[in-house]
Image (cartoon, rainbow, N blue to C red):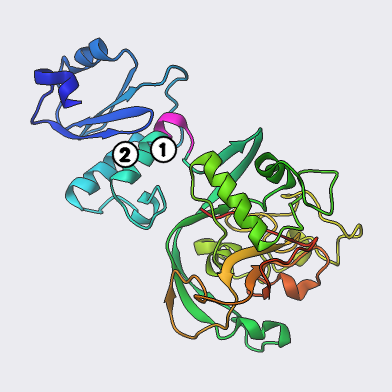
Amino acid sequence: MLETFGNKLPENDYVVTLDCPEFTLLCLKTGQPDFGRIIFNYIPRVRMVESNSLKLYLFSFRNHGDFHEDCVNISDVTALINYLLSENASGIFLANADCDRNGNVNISDLSVLINYLWSGSWPGSSFTIGGVTFNMVPVTGGTFTMGFTGETPDSDDESALPAHQVTLSSYSIGETEVTQALWVAVMGSNPSHFTGDTSRPVESVSWDDCQQFITQLNQMTGMTFRLPTEAEWEFAARGGNMSHGYTYAGSNTINDVAWNSNNNSTNTTQPVGQKEPNELGLYDMSGSVWEWCNDYYGAYSAENQTNPTGPASGVERAFRGGAFFNSAAGHRVWFRNHSSADLVANGLGFRLAL
C-alpha cells in the first residue's frame, strides 16, 4: 500500500494496512478531502465507510460480486481496531471479538470481521465439496462441569465419574453428522449399511476410516478439520455457554431431539436435521448414530482441566451420543462409549470439528 500510493499517502494518519485474500483494508484517523479520488485513480473498485473516529477504505481485487453489508455493523470494526490500538476493552465484548475462534483477540480477528462485512459469510461457516454443502457452527469457549452431575448415578453413569471442571477454547463443530452425500463427495464411495437417501448420516465407518476422510477433506479445502475431543463434544452437546442443563442434547424429552428405540419403528438411520436442535443449533447430538471422538478412552480425573485431549495412549477410542436403536440412557449428554479404532457398525458415524 505505501509503495502503491507513494508520497500521496498521508503518512501520519494511517492506522494499519491489512492485506487479505480478496481485499486490502486501510484505516485513516483523519479525513483527507482528496484521498477518495486518489484511491479511485489507482483501484476502480473501492468502498469507503466512515465512523466518528476512523475512515476505512476497502480495496477489492475481485472481478465479481458487490459489497454486501450484512448484520455486522461498521461500529464493530472500529471498536475492534480501537481495542487493538489501545487495549481498552470498553464498549467491546471480547468473547465475541474472537472472530477466528482461536482463543485470542488480535489482528487476524479484524481480517475475519472485515471479510464478513465484505462477503456476508464467516470463514469456516459453510463449505461446499462436489456440490454438497455442510455447515460448521462456532462454539464460544467456556468452562463447564463434564461428566455425570446428578445425585444418584446408576450403572450407566459410572464411566462419567467423577464430574470435573473443564475449560475449553473456542472451536467449531459440525451442524450435523457427516452425511453419506459428503462422504461420497470426498471419498467416492458409500460404506453405509442404510442407503437410499444420502442425507442420512454416514455409518459403518471406523475411527481409522474417519481419519482417512479428514485427511482427504483437508487436502481438498486447505482447512484443518478433525474429530472433536470428548470434552468438545460434550460441551457442544450440552449447549455450550447457552446450556439449559438438559439431560439430552436440547431437551429433557428424548423424542423431541433424538432418534432412539422408542420413536424409530423402521429401525434404520434417518436423514439428519429432522429433530429439534440444541441450544447451539446442533442436530442429532443425541440419537441417530454414535459419533467418534478423537480421544483414547480412559478414566476421568477429578482435577480441573483446560482443553483436555484424553489419555496420551490407549487401546480404544471414545464415541458419544447414542444411536437409533438405543434406549434413553445411551443418549444422555454425559454418557460415554468406547471400542477399538477399527470397529465398523451401522450405528456409528461422526461429525467434524475445526
Q: What residue would you read off at disc 2?
A: 77
Looking at the image, the residue that sits furthest to the bottom is: 152
- Asked if residue 12 is positioned above or below residue 146 in the image, the reply reads above
Q: From which residue to which does the magenta span run?
A: 116-121
- Asked if residue 244 is positioned above or below residue 226 in the image, the reply reads below
Q: Using the rendered view, name the quadrant where residue 161 is placed.
A: bottom right
Structural distance between the alpha carbons of marks 2 and 1:
8 Å
Does residue 70 appear left or right of residue 251 in this picture? left
Looking at the image, the residue that sits furthest to the top is: 41
Which amino acid is tagged 2? Val
Give the SS element for disc 2. helix
Which of 294 and 86 lies nearest the eye of the viewer? Answer: 294
The residue located at (77%, 72%) in the rendering is: 328
Which amino acid is tagged 1? Val
Tag 2 and tag 1, C-beta contact below 8 Å: yes
Does residue 24 appear left or right of residue 262 in this picture? left
- Tell me the number on the disc at residue 72: 1
Crowd tier of the residue under label 2, counting other residues whose Cα lies within 10 Å: few below 14, some 14–19, many 20 or above: many
Q: Main secondary structure of the magenta part?
A: helix
Which of 297 and 124 lies nearest the eye of the viewer? Answer: 297
Residue 305 location (% of width, % of height): 43, 76
- Tell me the number on the disc at residue 105: none
